[in-house]
Image: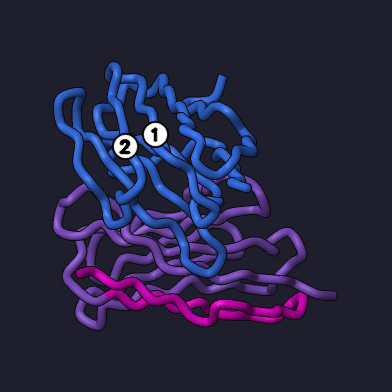
């Protein structure tokens, strides 16, 4: 099993629908993140959580919400999806490993809003 | 606001030749990361650079960091087709434990 698992892998939804993207991890890391990738823009931070009770907005949080259900689970919701939220979404975790501070990314969820 | 700029954004390489990707960032950083992404795939960690003058090498890739110039370079030696991918640099600003990414450099290696 992957260290960071995202579901679903692909999703097509209609404008105005509420949708949830889920992320679970087996690394035991406290810090978790949601990033969005658009062509030519790199990855941009949507929300991050440093523990179950600590949730923070990133640079592009408008239109999104999150829930940290447990140390291992961090979900991203689009309350009312719009076409410009079509993107590739990545969940990530981070912690010190082997002397370095590293980030582990999930496989991504490709979301299309029509 | 931390800004991370990569150049070039697109790089067409000829097999066997050497190339460099540049990553500039705007403010003091604790760590600089290089990642590789194949189309439709996740990000694969290549290097973590922590201090001024740090140099790391893995195969045909070598990354270096100059914190005074706020510049990191990813040098590719004798390019081969397998290196075709998008390469990202990312910066962790002052122990914020958040990454700010460059736009990525899409590398295509041709025969």
The one nearer the camera, A31 or A46, is A46
Majority secondary structure of magenta residues: strand
* Image quadrant in which you'd find residue A26: top left
Q: Quadrant of the N terminus of chain B?
A: bottom left
Measured in 3D between alpha carbons, the distance from the residue under mark 2 to the one under mark 1, in whole angstroms, is 6 Å
Q: Quadrant of the C terminus of chain B?
A: bottom right
The one nearer the camera, A50 or A84, is A84
Instruction: For mark 1, give the secondary structure.
Output: strand
* Chain letter of the residue beneath label 1 in the structure image: A
* Image quadrant in which you'd find residue A54: top left
Queried whether the magenta region covers residue A12, the answer comes back as: no
Q: Are the two marked residues, 2 and 1, in contact with CB atoms closer than 8 angstroms?
A: yes
| Residue A81 pos. (x, y %) | 48, 43
| Residue A68 pos. (x, y %) | 28, 24
Check residue A76 in the rendering and tell me which mark sits there, or answer none: 1
Instruction: For mark 2, give the secondary structure.
Output: strand
Q: What residue did someone put label 2 on? A: A65
* Above or below: residue A13 compared with residue B110: above
| Residue B93 pos. (x, y %) | 20, 60
| Residue B107 pos. (x, y %) | 65, 70
Q: Residue furthest right?
A: B111
Q: Classify residue B47 as left or right of residue B81.
A: left
Q: Classify residue A67 as left or right of residue B61.
A: left
Span colored in magenta: B1-25
Residue at image location 34% in from the left, 51% down from the top: A45
Q: Colour of chain A?
A: blue
* Image quadrant in which you'd find residue A79: top left
Q: Classify residue B80 as left or right of residue B62.
A: right
């Amino acid at each position: 099993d992957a260290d960071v698992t995202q579901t679903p892998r692909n999703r097509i939804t209609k404008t105005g629908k509420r949708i949830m993207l889920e992320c679970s991890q087996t690394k035991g890391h406290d810090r978790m993140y949601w990033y969005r990738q658009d062509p030519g823009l790199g990855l941009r931070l949507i929300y991050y959580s440093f523990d179950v009770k600590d949730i923070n907005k990133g640079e592009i949080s408008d239109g999104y919400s999150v829930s940290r259900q447990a140390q291992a689970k961090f979900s991203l919701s689009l309350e009312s999806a719009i076409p410009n939220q079509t993107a590739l979404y990545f969940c990530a975790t981070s912690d010190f490993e082997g002397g370095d501070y590293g980030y582990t990314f999930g496989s991504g969820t490709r979301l299309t809003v029509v | 606001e931390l800004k991370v700029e990569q150049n070039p954004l697109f790089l067409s390489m000829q097999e066997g030749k050497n190339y460099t990707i540049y990553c500039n960032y705007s403010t003091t950083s604790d760590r600089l990361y290089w990642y590789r992404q194949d189309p439709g795939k996740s990000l694969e960690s290549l290097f973590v650079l922590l201090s001024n003058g740090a140099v790391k090498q893995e195969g045909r890739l070598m990354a270096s960091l100059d914190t005074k110039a706020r510049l990191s370079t990813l040098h590719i030696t004798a390019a081969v087709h397998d290196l075709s991918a998008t390469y990202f640099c990312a910066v962790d600003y002052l122990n914020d434990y958040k990454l700010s990414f460059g736009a990525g450099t899409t590398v295509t290696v041709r025969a």
